[in-house]
Image (spheres, rainbow, N blue to C red):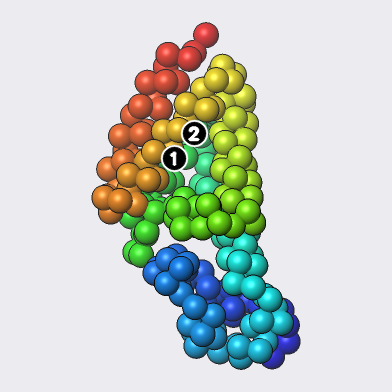
Amino acid sequence: MDSATAREQALDAAEELFYGRGIQSVGMDDIRGASGVSLKRLYQLFPAKEQLVEAYLERRDVRWRGRLAAHVERGTDPEERILAVFDWLEGWFGEDGFRGCAWINSYGELGATSSRVTAQVRAHKQAFRDYLAGLVAEAGLPGALAGQLFLLAEGAMVTAGITGSTRPAVEAREAARALLAAGRP
């Protein structure tokens, strides 16, 4: 097995286990067993578990933001594209195995002890906030709305992760609709 294949298999296993069970409850032996990558190879690829967590979050970020953007870009009306973010969140919250936001969960587990994990979480959240700011700018709305929409989305993620319901996305969408109406010139 070449390094690229081993890396992908290890990351696939890490994502499933870390997201499904939590990072601290998963050991490198668990990753080895689920990935089929030997422990020696695993440590060659990721000399520390923290590096595996960092790589897992980086890869998940690319996919998560890509899926969101692909959904939002289907819309043509700038305000509807903003609301489509919340529609996408509703679909995500309803997926089998949804356990909340991987970055919020990771920060909760490791944010106090891992600067690498904290950096990944902050980068992901900043990229999401910047994405919303771009949508707000395209709609010609006040820039301050981006932060408000960001907080609505983040609150919906936390609440959905805790309650196991898609309802927070619906409620956040309605609050976002009211913010957009109030922000129109």
Q: Residue at x 42, y 20 (%)?
A: 179
Q: Residue 175 location, x and y as percent?
A: 35, 27
Q: Residue at x 59, y 30 (%)?
A: 133
Q: Secondary structure at mark 1?
A: helix
CA neighbours of label 2 inside 10 A, class few (<14), some (14 to 19), many (20+): many
Q: From what the image shows, is residue 175 above or below residue 57?
A: above
Q: Amino acid at mark 1?
A: Glu
Q: Nearer the viewer, residue 139 or 6?
A: 6
Q: From what the image shows, is residue 3 above or below residue 101?
A: below
**Mark identifier at residue 61:** none
Q: Nearer the viewer, residue 114 or 164?
A: 114
Q: Residue 44 location, x and y as percent?
A: 71, 82
In contact (CB < 8 Å): disc 2 and disc 1: yes
Q: From what the image shows, is residue 24 above or below residue 62?
A: below
Q: Is residue 58 rendered to the left or right of residue 185?
A: right
Q: From what the image shows, is residue 42 above or below residue 12?
A: below
**Mark identifier at residue 154:** 1
Residue at the extreme top: 185
Q: Amino acid at mark 2?
A: Phe
Q: Mark 2 = which residue?
A: 150
Q: Residue at x 45, y 53 (%)?
A: 108
Q: Residue 85 location, x and y as percent?
A: 47, 40
Residue 64 visible: no
